[in-house]
Structure formats: C-alpha cells, structure tokens
Amino acid sequence: SDIEKGTYPHYMLKEIDEQPAVIRKIIQHYQDEQGKLVIDRDIIDAVNAADRVYIIAAGTSYHAGLVGKQFIEKMAKIPVEVHISSEFGYNMPLLSEKPLFVFISQSGETADSRAVLVQVKEMGYPALTITNVPGSTLSREADYTLLLHAGPEIAVASTKAYTAQLAVLAILAEVTAKSRSLEVGFDLIHELGLVANAMDVLCDSKEILEVIAREFFSVTRNAFFIGRGIDFYVGLEGALKLKEISYIQAEGFAGGELKHGTIALIEEGTPVVALATQESVNLSIRGNVKEVVARGANPCIISMNGLNMDEDSFVIPEVHELLTPLISVIPLQILAYYAALHRDCDVDKPRNLAKSVTVE
Ligand code: G6P
C-alpha cells in the first residue's frame, strides 16, 4: 500500500490515533467563513422534504447509523429507521410517504448496500451517501454525497471511519435542526472540539488499556458488552471490534436485556464490559452489572468522568452526553487491539474478513 504505517506496528493503531485529527479536519471541512457549520442546501432541502429518514448500512457503518438516528431524532426531530442493508432488500418495511434514504458506507462499495440503493432509486426515492471515498459506487449512484474526510482506512477493523461517520451525522443533524429553527441547546463546533481533545487523552491512555485488556481478555473465550441508550449501540460496536480481530466470542446487549436469556452464559470470570456515560441510566446500568457480578462475571466498567464510581476500570473525559459515542468507543477499540495482539492474531488482516465486501 502507498499509505505508510510509519513507526506504527499496525494500521489499526495508527488509524485509532488519527481520530482527533480527523474530527478537527471534519469541523474545518463543514465550516463556512463565519465559523458556522454548513452542508449543501440541496442536501438539507432533501432532508427537510422527507417525513422519515431510512439509514441503510452494514457492519460498523450500521452501528454508526444507530447512533446517527439518535442525533437526527433528538436534534432535527425527524423520525429515523436504521436497517441492515442485506435484510432491507428482500424484507422491506412499509415505507412512509416521503422517505429519504441515507447510505452509510466507509468504502462506498458494499454490495449489500448498493443493491438497496439500486432498488430505492428504481422506486424513485432520493438517496444520500455518507462515505469516505469520493467517486465510490454508492457516491456516484446516489443523488447526494457527504464525505467523511477521514483519509484512507487500511485496517480491516474500522475505527476512524466510525467516529468520522458519527461526527458527520451530528453535523447533518445540527444543520438540519438550524434550518428548521430548532434550538439544539449546545454549540456543536465547540463540543466537537472538546471531543477531539478528549480523544487525545484517550489515545494517550494505551498503557493502562493494555493492562486492562490483559486482565479481561487474554484467556477468556467470550465477553459481553452492555449499555443503555446510546451506550448500548457503542457496546455493539465494541463487541464487533473484539470479535473481528481477537476471535473472542463477544456480544453487545441492552443493559436490561441480558437477564432475559443471555445471563445463562455468565460463568465465573466471564468479562462483562459495561458503559456508563449517561446520567439518566447510570444507576440502572450499574444495577445490571450487579446482576452479572452475582453470577460470577468479571466486570469492566467504563464510565464518564462525573458519573464514575470506585469500582470502575476506566474513566473517559466528560463530553456532551449526546456525543459520548465518539469517545467511549476509543477505549473499546484499543482494548480490542491489545486483546488481538496478546492472542497473536493478525490485527490488520483478520481471518475470513475483507475490508470491503463487493459480493452480496
Ligand atoms: C466489511 C468490513 C466491515 C465494514 C463493513 C461495511 O464487512 O469488514 O469492517 O464495517 O464491510 O463496510 P462499508 O465500507 O460499507 O462501511
């Protein structure tokens, strides 16, 4: 590849470290001379013309879509559905009258997503692609494109594209909200700046995260990730990262759902990573941790500063509560990286996986 790893042992680690710079670059790209966030008027008009947004994506991009739904619904007050592209094509939900389709794809080449794009274009619906690759198939075939500006992502496990997707989705939500004269209640440029600073702190915390990875993941065969609300969606991504590169069987669950079946899998020492970044559910997620600890689980609580308690394994800096996924995912990426390294796995090229899947 013509992209160099430099002093990094793996592309994944390099790409994890690039995240603060990517966020700053995105802020620059989506800012006008007056320092206001801007997105092409055509795109904002298309969002405003829609009575419902349908986000279509696969893998990590699907997980970004789940968080993006929260951004768009909370800030711009437009209902959003998020669908796995390989399901949507043959199992299409009843559509609203004026849908807008939003395809999220790092590569812009995922065949499952493209198949849906072709279908909805035939049905005459507008489509926006959010991608890292200008001129990619999904970008060319959609009506509109928003670019991630994350730079090439080489490691198969997606890291910086995910946080870039979240930042661009937040900007899309904010600019749409402003165009509808809705008060979002915070200054997104300022808050994303704080996110980038918090990312710097997290990228400098690798040593402690390597110790945590050794403690929780060096011998286990499975692991669970729990969270409530947006922490649940980040947990899904954390579990995907861990299984993709370390081959540990990992699953993400809503905090309250584990007890409805999966808790049967908890044994002495089973790692359960719990995210606690949301004040409104801080006590309930900690209650869920107690339930699994009572069955022998080894809890790894990752909380946000201000919500942290003595038993927590790792504390992330405080950012706006809606933007926590941009930073809570970083310790999960780093934990997955070291888990894979400690288990002698090929971090950048995991078995059975391809960076971009161009077959359905
Ligand atoms: C592949 C990759 C995943 C990625 C997914 C979607 O399965 O291994 O890391 O999340 O495709 O890729 P896209 O390029 O559409 O975001």
Image (cartoon, rainbow, N blue to C red):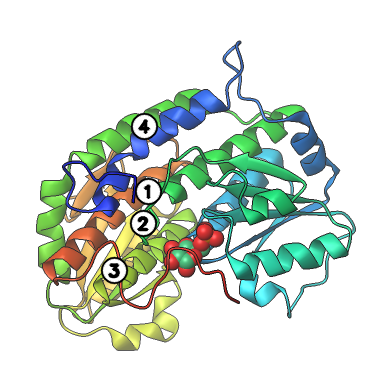
Tell me, for residue 277, which label it has, or none: 1
**Mark 2 and mark 1: Cα distance apart in space:** 11 Å
- The x and y percentages for residue 355 are 43, 63
What crowding class fits label 3: few (fewer than 14 Cα within 10 Å), some (14-19), or many (20 or more)?
many
What crowding class fits label 4: few (fewer than 14 Cα within 10 Å), some (14-19), or many (20 or more)?
some
Which label lies toward us, 2 or 1? 1
- The x and y percentages for residue 318 are 34, 36
Beta carbon of the mark 1 residue lies under 8 A of ligand 1:
no
Ranked by sequence position, the earlier of labels 2 and 1 is 1
Which label lies toward us, 1 or 3? 3
Quarter assignment of residue 34: top right
Q: Is residue 185 above or below residue 317?
A: above
In this rendering, position of residue 332 left or right of residue 94? left
Ranked by sequence position, the earlier of labels 3 and 2 is 3
The residue beneath circle 3 is 245
Q: Please name whichever residue, 13 or 253, is drawn nearer the observer in this view of the structure.
A: 13
Which label lies toward us, 1 or 4? 4
**Mark 1 and mark 3: Cα distance apart in space:** 25 Å
Quadrant of the image containing the C terminus:
bottom right
Ranked by sequence position, the earlier of labels 1 and 3 is 3
The residue beneath circle 2 is 283
What crowding class fits label 1: few (fewer than 14 Cα within 10 Å), some (14-19), or many (20 or more)?
many
Q: Identify the element where label 2 is drawn.
A: helix
The residue beneath circle 4 is 21
Ranked by sequence position, the earlier of labels 3 and 4 is 4
Ranked by sequence position, the earlier of labels 1 and 4 is 4
